[in-house]
Image (spheres, rainbow, N blue to C red):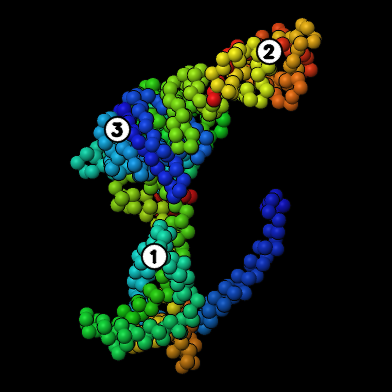
Amino acid sequence: MAQSSIMPGFRPAISFTIVYLSLVVLIPLSTLVFQSFQLSWDDYVHIITNKRVLSSFRVSFSTALIAALVASFFGFIVAWVLVRYSFFGKRFFHALIDFPFALPTAVAGIVLATIFQPSGFLGRLLIDSFGVQVAFKPLGIVMALIFISIPFVVRTVEPVLLEFESSMEEAASSLGATRLQVFGKIIFPNVFPALLTGFALAFARGVGEYGSVIFIAGNLPYVSEIVPLLIVTKLEQFDIEGATAIALTMLVISFLLLLLINVLQYWVRKRSGQL
Amino acid sequence: MSILLSNISKKFGTFTALDTINLEIPEGELVALLGPSGCGKTTLLRIIAGLERTDQGRVLISGQDRTDHDVSQRGIGFVFQHYALFRHMSVFENVAFGLRVKPRRERPSNAVIDKKVHALLDLVQLDWLHNRYPDQLSGGQRQRIALARALAVEPSVLLLDEPFGALDASVRKDLRQWLRNLHHDLNVTSIFVTHDQEEAMEVASQVVVLNHGHIEQQGSPGDIYDHPANAFVSRFIGHTNIFDLDEHDVDWLQTAGLSTAQPRGKIAHVRPHDIVIEKSTTETDAFVTLKDWQHLGSLIRIELIKNGSASSVYAEMPNDQFRRLHLNKGDKVDLRIRHAHWFH
């Protein structure tokens, strides 16, 4: 394979890739798996089926799912606006999109907690006018996750929208399609695989997010306690086994979800002849 | 359906793409909009389609004013230069699209759509590809699918933007003939844009020559070739030799047998096949030397040098006739001009 290849440097490149992936990804993750072997199956089940642990899983995955869905919706609109229209301050908005990437998550967390807490600027407004409390509730977690995951969606959808051939739209219009039909039957199906990728990234980030969530969540057990926080709590109590068991479960679920999304993506691409 | 354009003007910023265009296209014609790049031909096509708005002027399709109709309401079929097939749909769904997006009341049943799409795919001889996706097709196949898709909605006018531009030479030749035959069978008024004068002459029944946003001439291919309205058309269509009376070509033209006593202009355009050459019998008064020749298939193009000047004159004659002359490079040649077009 290496001999017949036109591209030089296959051997050093693949060696480097394997070493890098091993050091950074495979070794730490396998350590986690080996570490968990010290637990018996009964111990493991006992830790995982603990009520507090189960509810933290529910909180983490449901908030991440809702946040990823909302971020996909609004991220798509933001990407659409940035690609399709030219307006004053467009470059500024462009830069603003990446801000959550660059901001230390703890800073984001403190800022969000400050404005959304019941005495905060937005928090008071929401309680007074709608009776909705954001901070110290799962809703607060969703809010923080939307904030940090929107750029993932925008940055994956944007290049696909940019590349989109406008003549396809014109062709659809010339065949009698309404604006809504053009969007639903032509534009959206072409952007959907990218949107799915953005959703997957946003979701994965949301499940693992720690810094921006813990300040606004309030961390009430059974209500707004997320899995990463539970792991940290267990570690602080030197309950290494408990932390490992939860972490491993997290790893497996995340892996399965990403696999599912990839299969879905393969199916979408295949169905639309892109493979 | 007939098309009538009156006083169409269009500007992009300060650039005038079209300047008060008036054009009438009778029903059933196959018209070529021909011109160099940037002459406004594609803009004009897009204005007829409704893909571009006019600054001024009206577009009438079969007598009805469609200027303010959206592209989806004009009843036109448009074939894009790069086909613009829907990548995420099969060939069948691409062709069916125009039928599926019709309002519920007008939408045919699935069985009717199925029958119609297969009939159209048969018409373009590609029914065996109905399950494929556009990315799996060759350029010529995509072009024909794009045409079938445009025909599905039974347009009153078919518009094609550089329909053969992105194809290689042999496919292009076949498709030209095929399009001409198809038009003959369907008889739908069609307009196509091209920058290739050969293509326009070969395919179209009417040619409209555009330049700098103006119509230079409109007529049948024969008309335009034999009676060019101005110097631009004469230069743009076919090959031509240009002689300028102000640049001391007078004597030369008189020697070549062309009367310059009462010229109808300052510049004479002479088609290569209107120049007759013979091997010079008298060495002294020959004033042209044969420099080189090229085979163009059935024709030979002969490059001649005017003695005492560096510029070349081109003549063309049938292959066998050239062979009978027994000419060699460097031979002195007698030359006679049979006909010229005069321009100011």
Task: Determine whether A275 is above or below A96 in the image.
Answer: above
Q: Taking B200 as reference, is B122 left or right?
A: left
Location of residue B154 (image quadrant)? top left
Marks 3, 1 in one chain: no
- Residue A225, visible in the rendered structure: no
Of the numbered discs 3 and 2, the one sitting upstream in the chain is 3
Please name the residue that numbered disc 3 is placed on. Answer: B61
- In this orientation, which residue lies closer to the viewer: B179 or B15? B15
- Would residue B220 be seen by someone viewing this image from the given angle? yes
Q: Which residue is mark 1?
A: A78
Please give the residue where the numbered disc 2 appears in the rendered image. Answer: B255
Q: Pointer 1: residues within 10 angstroms few (<14), some, or many (20+)?
A: many
Q: Quadrant of the N terminus of chain B?
A: top left
| Label 3 close to label 2 by CB (< 8 Å) | no
Disc 1 residue type (three-letter): Val
Label 3 and label 2: CA atoms lie apart by: 54 Å
Q: Which residue is nearer to you in this view: B55 or B110?
A: B55
Q: How far separated are the C-alphas under marks 1 and 2? A: 76 Å
| Residue contact between numbered discs 1 and 2, judged by CB atoms under 8 Å | no
Query: Which of pointers 3 and 1 indicates the residue nearer the eye?
Result: 3
- Quote the CA–CA distance across marks 3 and 1: 40 Å
**Residue at x 58% of width, y 72% of height:** A26
Kind of element beneath mark 3: strand
Disc 2 packing (10 Å; few <14; some 14–19; many ≥20): some
Q: As shown in the figure, which amino acid type bears the numbered disc 3?
A: Ile
